[in-house]
Image: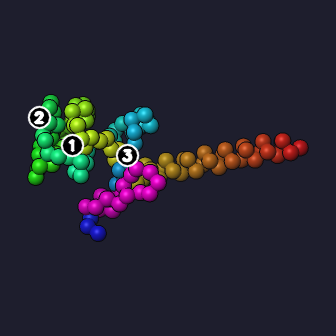
């Protein structure tokens, strides 16, 4: 395996990169939380890109260029205006959320704590019902 490859997670849309120690989660707009907004990036799905260049032509920040007939987004210039997403007829440009492993571990730990708390409440209710 090359260091640039991303590993796919099973069961939900996401990938992990051992090289960059980052996780990319594909989260639809309706499920995004405000805390995730800092991690949003627009990415080109190379397998869908046909190299028409419409995204590059219509990008107000000139953040998209074509390399080897495939679009590339310069994340330093991109302001997430979504014009490219709207213009791409192939659906090759999508939103991705990139976070490091540590915040994800913290979130999972908080969720586990919340689950334990809820299980205790359920057990107390079941005990009261049995009485």
Q: Residue at x 53, y 51 (%)?
A: 109
Q: Are marks 3 and 1 in contact (CB under 8 Å)?
A: no
Report the residue marked by disc 3: 26
Report the residue marked by disc 1: 75
In the rendered image, residue 12, in percent from the top left (x then y), is placed at 44, 51
Q: Quarter-wise, where is residue 51 in the image?
A: top left
In the rendered image, residue 79, in percent from the top left (x then y), is placed at 23, 34
Q: Residue at x 37, y 46 (%)?
A: 26
Q: In this image, 76 relative to 121: left or right?
A: left
Start-end of magenta stretch: 4-21
Report the residue marked by disc 2: 57
Q: Residue at x 47, y 54 (%)?
A: 11
Q: CA distance from mark 3 to mark 1?
A: 17 Å
Q: Is residue 24 visible?
A: yes
Q: Are marks 2 and 3 in contact (CB under 8 Å)?
A: no
Crowd band around label 3 with a 10 angstrom C-alpha radius: few (<14), some (14–19), many (20+): some
């Amino acid at each position: 395996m090359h260091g640039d490859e991303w590993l796919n997670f099973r069961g939900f849309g996401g990938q992990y990169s051992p090289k960059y120690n980052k996780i990319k989660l594909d989260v639809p707009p309706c499920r995004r939380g405000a805390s995730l907004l800092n991690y949003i990036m627009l990415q080109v799905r190379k397998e869908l890109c046909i190299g028409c260049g419409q995204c590059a032509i219509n990008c107000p920040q000139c953040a998209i260029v074509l390399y080897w007939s495939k679009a590339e987004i310069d994340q330093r210039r991109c302001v997430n205006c979504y014009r490219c997403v709207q213009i791409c007829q192939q659906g090759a440009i999508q939103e991705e959320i990139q976070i490091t492993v540590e915040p994800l571990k913290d979130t999972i730990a908080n969720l586990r704590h919340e689950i334990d708390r809820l299980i205790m409440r359920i057990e107390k209710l079941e005990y009261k019902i049995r009485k």
